[in-house]
Amino acid sequence: MPTQQQEAAIRFGCFFGTLLVMAVWEMLAPRRPLTQSKPLRWSSNLGLALLNNVVWRLLMPAGAVGLAISLQARGWGLFNSVELSAWFEIAASVVLFDLAIYGQHWLFHRVPWLWRLHLVHHVDLDFDATTGVRFHTVETLLSFVWKAAILALLGAPALAVMIFEILLNATALFNHSNARLPLWLDRVLRLALVTPDMHRVHHSIENHETNSNYGFCLPWWDFLFRTYHAQPAAGHDAMTIGRPEFRDAQVERLAFMLRLPFRREMPPTPCRHARQSRP
């Protein structure tokens, strides 16, 4: 297992390497034309990600990997209580963590005060790799608490936690990207990996489409729990990205993102909104 400094360097290297690849891919083969100022969106979205990382390092310098090492030393969690193959524990931990993130995402769409935070991610008027790191600071902290609870239950190996964190960051950049994939390749990939076309449906302005495709890495949970929606009704070229209540370009400014969850008047969650709109 790498040291804490080496683990941080590996994670950042994978993140920036993936971001660079996706940025070049989006430039050479874009899926849709962008509608907003790219310099403004990128500076705001990446600025928010940088702020989150600074807060994360100040409040939780050891991170999830450090927590896993501490729990292992104390013998906490399922995998620290039974004798199993190391590789089975790593593989099972990664899959179960992915299920936990699916569950977290589902909850953030249904609990009103959680939706307030998650709305920062959904009001983006365009959809590209930087959307994958556009999360309110409080949401990232709550996400860590959720992952810490799952980690305490599982007692996952530190290596599994590092692998999952790298996968989560890399797949978030990939499946939020504006990169064009051949349709045949998209159909094959989405059997085992959430693709940009699959996740873009989740960012549709239509509530029934927003309430689908919650997966970040593995698509299996959407298939299993019947939250899978193959294609947007309007098609990928014509679909509208974002939320109907926030259509002004100010949503792309960092200051707006940080203030958004604390507005007095807020729209209902997409699930509640969909129920209210039924005849």
Image (tube, helix red, strand yellow):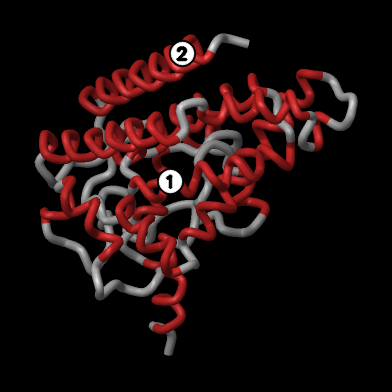
Q: Which amino acid does label 1 sit on?
A: His
| Residue to which mark 1 is pinned | 199
Q: How many labels does the image show?
A: 2
Q: Which mark is residue 186?
A: none
Residue 268 in view here? yes
Task: Name which residue lies at 17% across and 62% down.
Answer: 247
**Residue 251 image offset from top left, x and y in percent:** 17, 54
* Percent x, y of residue 149: 64, 45
Q: In which quarter of the image is the C terminus?
A: bottom left
Circle 1: element type: helix
Depth order, front residue of 214/237:
214
Q: In this view, does 235 lie above or below 92?
A: below
> What residue would you read off at disc 2?
10
Residue at x-position 58% and y-position 41%: 147
Q: Give the mark nearer the N terminus: 2 vs 1.
A: 2
Left or right of residue 11: residue 30: left
